[in-house]
Image (spheres, rainbow, N blue to C red):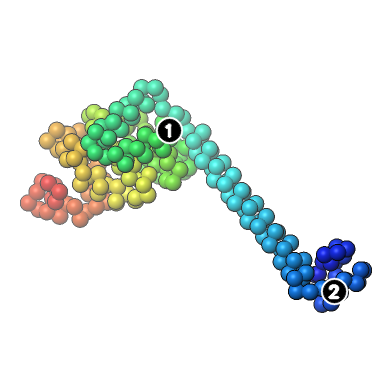
Amino acid sequence: MKKKCPNCKLVNYPNAEKCARCGSAFNDRNAETSLAGPQTSKILRRVFICIAVSIITVAGFYVSLVFSAASLSYEERKTVERSIAILEEKGFSNEAMILKRLAVYRANDNWLNASVAKENAFAATNFPFEIVTLYPDFFTYPADDVERAAILLHEARHLLGEDEREAYEYVWRNRKKLGWVGERYGNSVAWSEIRKQTREYTPNLFVCDTNPYGDCTE
């Protein structure tokens, strides 16, 4: 670090008391201006560059996730809209808002999902990018839009930052509020699969021997 003369702009040695060219004396104010000013400017410029590069990198990553997968068809989008409307009607307004306003839906795996083994055959979520992938099984196996709403409710909890255990427990505890009950859906493929996965992730809900399947929420 060196002292720059505020008069003639000559760069002097750090221990110089006056400018070698014009003879101007260096005081504390001049030294602070010549040293701290440019240094602060360089730091701020580097911080700005780092922030800009980070934003561009994250944006590029997001775009690659979206465009490396196919979009939903018109009929599939309508099915999703009906299921979200059910969630909204049943009082899951926060989840419905996220699914309606923030989520981006894809019909198959993006490059990141394709690299990870998945047990869930219905859907997958990329948090915090709010990307929801709906596999063909989502449209095939559920008995109706109420069951699809249950699956979307699970994915909405992921979009809120919850892990698998929290998402499965939330949906299972709120299934009656949704209208997704065993009396009506007990024989469906989606019900059986989701109940099995819920027992795997939240075994504490299935320890009541007096209830069917040990389900303590019955």
Q: Residue at x 33, y 29 (%)?
A: 80
Mark 2, Cα crowd under 10 Å, few <14 / some 14-19 / many 20+, is few
Res 148 visible:
no
Give whichever of 84, 34 is nearer the camera.
Answer: 34
Residue 90 occupies quadrant: top left
Q: Which mark is residue 106?
A: 1
In the image, taking residue 56 as reference, residue 123 lies left or right, namely: left
Q: Secondary structure at mark 2?
A: loop
On the image, the x and y values in percent for residue 73 come to: 40, 24
**Extreme right residue here?**
21
Mark 1, Cα crowd under 10 Å, few <14 / some 14-19 / many 20+, is many
Q: Residue at x 25, y 41 (%)?
A: 194
Judge whether 214 appears above or below 82 on screen: below
Judge whether 211 appears above or below 188 on screen: below
Residue annotated with mark 2: 25
Residue 89 occupies quadrant: top left
Nearer the observer: mark 2 or 1; the answer is 2
Q: Residue at x 25, y 49 (%)?
A: 169
